Image: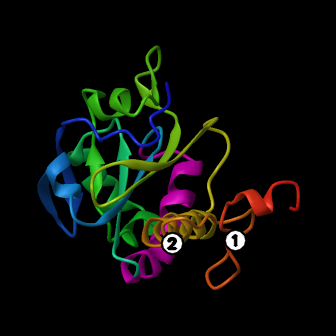
Amino acid sequence: MSLINTQVKPFKATAFHNGKFVDLTEASLKGKWSVFVFYPADFTFVCPTELEDLANNYAEFSKLGVEVYGISTDTHFAHKAWHDTSDAIKKVQYPLIGDPTGLLSRNFEVMIEEEGLALRGTFVINPEGQIKVLEVHDNGIGRDAAELLRKVKAAQYVASHPGEVCPAKWTEGAATLKPSLDLVGKI
């Protein structure tokens, strides 16, 4: 069974955000779009490049009313230490959630049990708390924040335009499709 269109399961976690520790729950997500970006661990190699890329694009996500959350099985204390010592992570203005028990990683089905680490999982969550985009891949493959931004825009477009869908490589302002009997076999 896929997690697409399912509700985010209940959770309680602590994040490092803007120099403070903040408590978050599934209720914290309600009313706005959210992106969960799971990554294996702090103080590693691919992870800081991804989180820095997200930080460099964070203003664009914010303009869309989207909050980004970085999540690993490290503690919120480790997130603070990483923030304080890494030039790349110092740029991060979004919450870094600690998941030392692995509850969130298991809820989103990205936990590598034998390693106690998360796979690289990306989830776009709508304001009602439903998962609308899901992408999980090998930990050796870094993600692209610009492509994630495009997917968020597509998810928001589809949500606000019932009956329309976004074709491959759709970008904001491009033509969409209105599925109907008249389109069958004509695309």
- Residue in view at x 47 percent, y 38 percent: 40
Residue sitting nearer the eye, 177 or 133: 177
Examine the residues drawn in magenta and state their main secondary structure.
helix
Residue 131 shown in magenta: no
Residue 108, numbered label: none
Q: Position of residue 46 (x, y in %)?
A: 59, 49
Q: CA distance from mark 1 to mark 2?
A: 11 Å
Q: Position of residue 23 (x, y in %)?
A: 11, 51
Give the magenta range.
42-63
Contact check, label 1 and label 2, Cβ < 8 Å: yes
Res 25 seen here: no
- Residue in view at x 43 percent, y 75 percent: 61
Residue carrying label 2: 157
Figure coloring: rainbow
Question: Considering only order in the chain, which callout, 2 or 1, is on the residue closer to the N terminus?
Answer: 2
Classed neighbour count for the residue bearing mark 2: other residues with Cα under 10 Å, few (<14), some (14–19), many (≥20): some
Residue 170, numbered label: 1
